[in-house]
Amino acid sequence: MKRAVEEESSSSSDSSDDDLVGPSLNDIPSKFENPQLVKKRKKKTIIDESKLIENIQFNEEYGDSYTQEANISCVALNPIDDSILVAGLKNGAVKFWRKKSTTGDGKNKDNNKEDKETYTGQLEFIKQFSAHPQKEVSQLIIDIDGARLASIAKNDSNVKIFDLITLDMIQVLNLNFIPSTRSNYVSCWYKSRNTNHLVISEQDTNKIHILNPDDDDFEIIKTIHRNPLNVINYNPKYQCIISADIKGIVEYWTPQEENTPKSVQFKYKSETDLLEFAKNKSPPSCINFSPDFETFVSISYPDNCIRLFDFKSGKLLKSYDESIKAYEKNETNIQLKLINSERKLYIDDPEDILKQGNIIFDESGKFLLFGTLLGIKILSLQTNKVIRVLGTSDQLQLNLRFHQLALSNKSSISNFSMEMLSSNNSILNSSLNKVPILICSAVNSDKLYLFNTLQTPRHNDIDLTVKVKGKKQKPVAVNKSSKIILHTTLGDIKLKLFNELVPKTTENFIKLCEKGYYNSTIFHRVIKTFMIQAGDPLGNGTGGESYWGGYIKDEFNSLLRHSKPFMVSMANSGPNTNGSQFFITTEKAPWLDNKHTIFGEVTDGFEAVKSIEDIETDSDDKPLDQVILLSTSLED
């Protein structure tokens, strides 16, 4: 499906006049113009920027920061409901946050009367998952409907799927290859016939896998590029995927078409400016679309250049040099210090600084926001001027380098035409007046940083003691969990225990394992598409007791739900009757919430669980062929 790189030098007839190379009708002096030959120039609508700037008029220093238990590796915002923020951590955790509601004057309802000592910021922590234990989350990909999130981690063949309505993990895709994590933007969602597919690049190869999470048998493998991919994204308006490899070769394609998609205005790349990356030996590491999907912006390295393209024609509209050399031409004392810090980042950890940063549009599509060595720049695409730089003093004084951004400021702007936006309308102005926040991560930092427009205290460092249903509770320290292996006659099953959330229950289970209590017991109850049960020394479902004798009480936690398969819970005969018996779910079972204590989840050995589930049983759900739990072992 390779497109020709240098064929047919003639320009496409449907390219815009402004983008033609060489003489065009726009070059004819006015006195020679023939009205029948010359296209009427469309008057450019200039929007009053003051109306739009209100939504990005952030304070120059960050307002809030939220410390995590590990460095932040990626962030993502739901494109449909931009009050939902997702963060991926280097320890494998995926965390969900919600933007707090605001009053009419832009103040947090929760914080109206709070002083600096009790102020809890503009984000509310919801829940987190140990999605990829001890493996760095490198990609958080949200589908265009804002319904599902896929998380990908380094050297992990398991892709985790989350429901963004319920904020639950709903699926695990066990791939037969390792996804590429060359950049944070090397996989995407693709929609075809109302079905969302995952497009995942394979590590260190040129293979691109197209998967349907709802159909295990569906897989298309493409080799669009000769080299491994560096970045990929999907344009739903033109139903077209754009990708670039490590050599800077850019391709437009769809899984269905063998040639350049018919939705674009060129046939050969020689008619476009897409070869700029290859010519400069600087492949893009991030590509983002404008809200109307008519243009896209990229960051490329090592030239550190920002380029704005017209998507349909592939023509370069603007470019901005953000290299160190560009700053050195007009350096000040402050710039010199920041330049030296930037150089150190390039030397110490080039992967973070070169491959993880992003660039975003505001919701009007008239401004770009991106991290630089000076701070976060807000650039007007109408005037080509930087209207504001955020976080310069933060980067200088705190040795920070902001690099991943997410902008939460949805308003009803999409309901208004360009003519309305350029008018002086008081009702429109009030509709556009929102309370935005800019969420940022920084290189090698364990904090989320928030820039806001409110008159709240600056540098509010919040230590992540969050409120969950009225109770103060520290977030789960996912790296502080025990791992148990169940050695069965059908294979090993690895469990991760939630020590900090349900300490008494996990202590009971661990001590029983250490005691050898479960050795040579059987899985005595199996119900297909529901669960497998074990832990009874009598083998009939009536026996067993806790490590201390008798029963232990229920331990229900709002962060633990039977919202996905492979959860490990205590079996009981009623409230507070937990002994030694436990079960593993094989499907979602939300009706069990607050009835059975969840104390762990399966992290490996899913095939063994499914093999036990498939065993033939009698009328009492007892397997006809015994499956024995031979022994257990504690990993750490």
Image (spheres, helix red, strand yellow):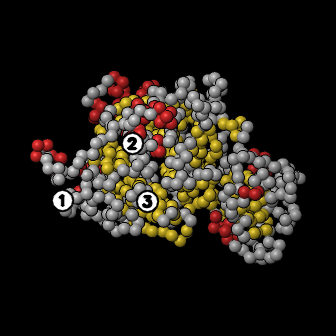
Up-down relation of residue 206 to residue 507 (above or below): below
Q: Is residue 346 left or right of residue 58?
A: left
Residue neighbourhood size for the residue with mark 1, other residues' Cα within 10 Å, grouped as few (<14), some (14–19), many (≥20): few
Q: To which residue does mark 1 refer? A: 10
Q: Residue at x 38, y 33 (%)?
A: 48
Q: To which residue does mark 2 refer? A: 418
Quadrant, the N terminus: bottom left
Residue 328 % position (x, y): 28, 30
Residue 356 % position (x, y): 43, 45
Asked which quadrant contains residue 359, the reply is: top left
Q: Residue at x 77, y 59 (%)?
A: 582
Picture disc at residue 430: none
Q: Residue at x 75, y 61 (%)?
A: 583
Q: To which residue does mark 3 refer? A: 201
Query: Amino acid under label 3?
Result: Ser
Residue 82 % position (x, y): 53, 44
Residue that extends furthest to the front in the rendered view of this protein: 35
